[in-house]
Image (tube, coloured by chain):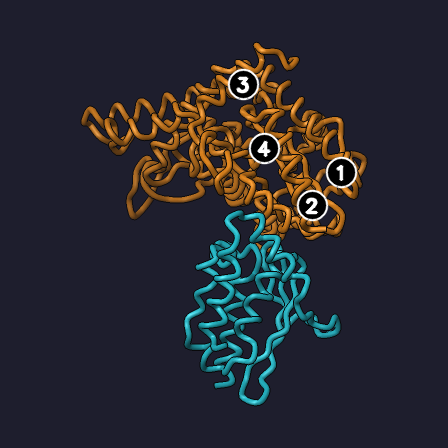
Chain colours: A cyan, B orange
Amino acid sequence: MNYTEKQNSIIEDFSMFDDWMEKYELIIDLGKEIELIPTEDKQDDQLIEGCQSRVWLKSNYKNGKMFYYADSDAIITKGIISLLIKVMNGEKPKTIAQEELFFIKKIGLQEHLSPTRANGLLEMVKRMKLDAIKNI
Amino acid sequence: MMDTPKKNTIIEGIRAQFPILTQKVNGRNLIYFDNAATSQKPKSVIDRISSYYEKENANIHRGVHTLSQEATTSYEQARQKISSYLNARSESEIIFTKGTTDGINLIASSFGELLNPGDEVLISAMEHHSNIVPWQLLETRKKIKLKVIPIHKSGEIDLKEFENLLNKKTKLVSITHISNSLGIINPIDEIIHKSHKVGAKVLIDGAQSIQHEKIDLQELDCDFFVFSGHKVYGPTGIGVLYGKSELLNIMPPYQGGGDMIEKVSFEKTTFNVLPFKFEAGTPNIVGGIALGTAFDFIESLNFEECQVHELELLRYAEEQLRSISGIQIFGNSKNKTSVISFNVGNIHPFDIGTLLDKQGIAVRTGHHCTQPIMDFYQIPGTIRVSFSIYNTKSEIDLFMAALNKSIQILS
């Protein structure tokens, strides 16, 4: 699947639920699956401080592709991170830097990317893109 | 007040005056438990704002035309009303500000100018960032010493330490009446009395108390009292700083501009009398007027009955919450207002807050602008529910069901 197809697939997964609580149950389950950053790697330079929940992000560039590892102390934040990682992992830096990231808004989670700084997610997406740009 | 049909009718009557309470949020009826952040507004306040802009809008204090004179009268009447509600000696001691933060900054800047290196300012460990940072800035600027009264594990202020910290160098004790994150009511009568004994002035942060406690400034005898209009059914962007006139008169102006001057020349500028000396620029006219309407609304209530109702909500919610396994309530005191801060096991407050929101329930999560308290308890934050007069026990029942569902999903 390409970048757009991966995003469409997530949108389809979420379209099965009308109820917000069911959508969040899915996000929470995803949060439990995420590949964590090893504790020794949870350094300050990987930390993105939100006002409420905190996020750690580590990027790797390997064989022309980007790979991300992340964690958060809040499980909903972690679930959303897991979605971002699903979409971005294994993609070329140029794709991540240039193509539109639209699924968050489409599944109705844009409030988590609002500039309230509550969860550090907006800053994290910026950091993911910047890390990709560095490797173009 | 028992849960009688009469009481339910009173609460229903109050609820009917708040249009927002019929809103749907995420498809559910709104349950608003974030009253410590801001209160909702009664229809009378909302109507006052629109009628001002529709019929009265003009700049005040200067115009000779009718509209300007009428707007001036309304604005000054609001000041009188607030002054008499708070039992200040005179309305010249009531200064309109942007809010609590603005009021504290004004005092830190202006009263702060009267302080000398080595003078001490005392705050407590439970202060809002707004009552910490202005003093830290003053510490850098004027080389004063900022000292912090510790709190007990219960969240109550350590009065013995307070007395130890008080000394002849203490020039100001700046303390919150009610902790915004824990709901604990401080014994401010005792604090004011003891501070005055060493010659220190006292600033009371009334942001949380103005809605829940009846304030009598002359009886309280504090030197400054600040609050925000939006926490007491009024609009945002307006607040009040009360100060004893003998202090306000010797304090230098905070900001320069229109309204605060008597005469301006390049050689010498003289300043206006109180309260105008501290109100530079066109003020928040509609804010002041509508804040007056908010106090009319409060005066239409039976304040004591409302206090009893809020305390009943507090006790009822605390009792329900204590039945949840792994619950930890922060702030335990006999003297509490209707605020409960808690965590459940290791669940992050942000997660619970998000799921409650999806079920139509507005609570606050996070550090509530009191990071030192969170550090004290070594937690990232709490979930805070705070009740107002229009909340009900049946809302608490719905909240409990939503909370239990959230915990189940997150565990």
Kindly report which numbered mark, 1 or 4, lies closer to the viewer in this rendering: 1
Which amino acid type is marked by label 2?
Ile
B20 with respect to B197 (left or right): left
Nearest to N terminus: mark 3 or mark 2: 3
Do the numbered discs 3 and 4 sit on residues whose CB atoms are within 8 Å?
Answer: no
For label 3, the residue is: B11
Which amino acid type is marked by label 4?
Gln
Q: Residue furthest left?
A: B65
Do the numbered discs 2 and 1 sit on residues whose CB atoms are within 8 Å?
Answer: yes
Q: Nearer the viewer, residue A85 or B150?
A: A85
Q: Are marks 2 and 4 on the same chain?
A: yes
Judge the density around disc 3: few (<14), some (14-19), many (≥20) Cα neighbours within 10 Å. Answer: some
A99 with respect to B263 (left or right): right
Q: Are marks 1 and 4 on the same chain?
A: yes
Q: Nearer the viewer, residue B46 or B164?
A: B46
Q: Marks 3 and 2, Cα distance to the nearest angstrom?
A: 30 Å
Which amino acid type is marked by label 1?
Ile
Q: Are marks 3 and 4 on the same chain?
A: yes
* Relative to B334, residue A121 above or below: below
* Circle 1 SS class: loop
**Image disc number at residue B305:** none
Question: Could you tell me which residue is drawn at 73 percent across and 73 percent down?
Answer: A38
For label 1, the residue is: B324
Kindly report which numbered mark, 2 or 4, lies closer to the viewer in this rendering: 2
Kindly report which numbered mark, 1 or 3, lies closer to the viewer in this rendering: 1
**Image disc number at residue B407:** 2
Mark 2 chain = B
For label 4, the residue is: B208
Residue B52: where, in percent of width, then height? 29, 28
* Circle 3 SS class: helix
Residue B74: where, in percent of width, then height? 33, 23
